[in-house]
Every structure is written in C-alpha cells, then in structure tokens.
Image: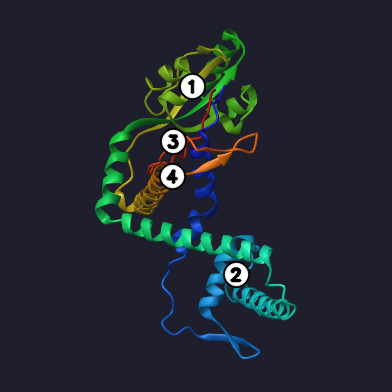
C-alpha cells in the first residue's frame, strides 16, 4: 500500500507543479523601450504586454500556432481584453468585495512568482550547478548494458528446436518473429538494458555473452529463452554540458522548495477543524527535494 504524502508536502508539490514554470520566467528581461504593436483608444499594447499574455495563455494555445500567427493571436486577445475590460470598468464591474478579493489573490500570486524567480536565479550559480551535477554523477556510476534479442517458448524442447534452426544459419530475428511467444515481437529485439532490468536467470545468461553469441535454452518464470547479444557497452554519466539545464532547474527548484518550507516553519498558521475551531497547524514535514539531474535512458523497462 502506498502512503499518501504529508499535507505540507502535497501542498508544496501542487504549488510547484502549478506555478514554477511561470515563476522561472516572470522576472525576465523587459525591453528598455518596448515597441508599440497596437493602440486601443490611445492606450498602447507593447511587445512586453504580448510577452506577459503569452506567458499566461501560451500553454493553452494549439502547438501548430507558431511564429507571426501566434503573436497575432495573442495581440488580438489583448485587444479584446482591453475592450472588454474598458466596458467592465464603465459598468463598475471592477468594484465590490468579490472583485477586490480576487484582485488580492492575483496580486499575491504574482508577488509569489516574483519571489520564487528571484530565489531560483540567485541559487543557480555555476558552483551550485556543478555540485548538483557531481552529486548526481557519484550516485550514477558507469554501468554495463547489452543490446539483445530473444526467442521465448513454453517448453525446453521447443527452445532446443529453435536453437537448432539458428545454429544451422537461419536468421535469429526471422526465427523469433515466427516462433517467439513474446507479445512485443519485432524480431525478439529487447533494445539496450542493464542487468537489473531483467529477471535474474535471463540477466545472468545475457551478460555472459559477447556480441554475436547465442545462449543455450534458459528457463525463467516466463518460459524458455534463446538469447542473442547484439552489442555491449558501458553507459557513462553524461558530461556536465549535457545536463547543465537540468542541474540549473534542480538547484533553483530546491532553493524555492526550501524557502517555502522555511516560511511555513516560522509563520503562525491556524486551520479550521471539523468543528470550525481554528487550531495551530502542525510543524511542516520536510518535503522531498526535486529530482536530481539524471542521465537519459533509451532502454525501456522490460521483463522477458
């Protein structure tokens, strides 16, 4: 049974899932003298306005909407926004407690995003990024991988018969396509995998083979396998340059997460219980750190 994350951790997870990407961009460099793209009743709409709107509505736009068409769509949106907002103000719809409450919410949200962006950028120094990378590299030492094919059959007799056909010169992939009970098909190709990705009996046999060698029938809980190793390699942790962006995100997000946790730790927070009484919030449980930079893996989890 999987235990649910502590409440503070769940809140932090939701917080960062929903706003971190925006927070990283919100304090982006603004144009010193932004170009005016349109005017609505004399009020300018600039490149910076379009950039702000794109940050807000961009994730919801169709991916095929690119380049000038994308900018035009956002500019049209801003023109509609200005016109509708002007009419709403004339009708005094921007007054009243409900509007003020929602305005406070968006003010706080933007302030939070600005703070998190500032903290993230300050934390993502070259030294911190290299340390995050070095820690991840130490946790991911070089590992041996093989690229193999197999033929899976229900009995040893069938496996021996398949092996005999391959030994007589038939193409391994052809025999696998014809006989193997592995639903993955594709000539029995398993791609690249490390030893821990396969059941022990299969892994032990595969990693004893050199490229081009074929195993005797191997029994596992899934049946009988004939294994052919195509290639072997040592997978090393990628160089820093390939993971620099991941390291920067990790360092920034960890600093942001630590900040939110520290603010919880120093604030007096009360919550209403089931009876409606305000009670102090328990001390926050430390949330899990964001995932450290990791190497890409082109091997899919497989269990032959």
Q: Secondary structure at mark 1?
A: strand
Measure how far apart labels 4 and 2 are at the Cα level: 41 Å
Q: Are marks 1 and 3 in contact (CB under 8 Å)?
A: no
Residue drawn at x 38%, y 42% is 292
Tell me the quarter of the image containing the C terminus: top right
Location of mark 4 (residue)? 264
Residue farthest front in this picture? 277
Q: Secondary structure at mark 3?
A: loop
Residue farthest bottom in this picture? 42
State which mark lies toward you, 1 or 3: 3
Measure how far apart labels 1 and 2 are at the Cα level: 48 Å
Location of mark 1 (residue)? 227
Ranked by sequence position, the earlier of labels 4 and 3 is 4
Residue 66 marker: 2
Color style of the picture = rainbow
State which mark lies toward you, 4 or 2: 4
Q: Nearer the viewer, residue 17 or 241?
A: 17
Q: Secondary structure at mark 2?
A: loop
Q: Residues within 10 Å of mark 1 (few under 14, many from 20)?
A: many
Residue 283 marker: 3
């Amino acid at each position: 049974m999987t235990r649910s994350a502590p409440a503070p951790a769940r809140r932090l997870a939701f917080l960062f899932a929903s706003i971190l990407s925006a927070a990283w961009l919100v304090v982006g460099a603004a144009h010193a003298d932004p170009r005016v793209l349109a005017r609505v009743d004399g009020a300018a709409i600039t490149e910076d306005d379009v950039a702000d709107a794109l940050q807000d509505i961009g994730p919801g736009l169709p991916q095929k909407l690119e380049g000038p068409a994308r900018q035009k769509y956002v500019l049209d949106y801003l023109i509609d926004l200005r016109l509708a907002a002007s009419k709403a103000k004339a009708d005094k719809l921007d007054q009243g407690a409900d509007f003020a409450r929602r305005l406070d919410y968006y003010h706080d949200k933007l302030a939070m995003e600005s703070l998190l962006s500032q903290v993230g950028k300050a934390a993502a120094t070259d030294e911190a990024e290299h340390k995050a990378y070095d820690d991840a590299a130490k946790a991911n030492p070089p590992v041996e991988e093989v690229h193999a094919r197999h033929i899976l059959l229900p009995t040893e007799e069938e496996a021996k018969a398949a092996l005999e056909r391959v030994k007589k010169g038939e193409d391994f992939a052809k025999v696998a396509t014809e006989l193997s009970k592995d639903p993955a098909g594709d000539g029995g190709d398993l791609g690249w995998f490390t030893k821990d990705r396969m059941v022990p009996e299969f892994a032990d046999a595969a990693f004893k083979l050199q490229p081009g060698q074929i195993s005797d029938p191997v029994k596992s809980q899934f049946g009988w396998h004939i294994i052919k190793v195509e290639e072997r390699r040592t997978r090393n942790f990628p160089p820093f340059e390939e993971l620099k962006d991941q390291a920067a995100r990790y360092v920034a997000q960890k600093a942001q997460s630590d900040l939110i946790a520290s603010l919880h730790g120093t604030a007096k927070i009360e919550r209403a219980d089931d009876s409606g009484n305000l009670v102090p919030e328990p001390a926050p449980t430390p949330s899990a750190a964001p995932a450290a930079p990791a190497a890409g893996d082109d091997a899919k989890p497989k269990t032959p």
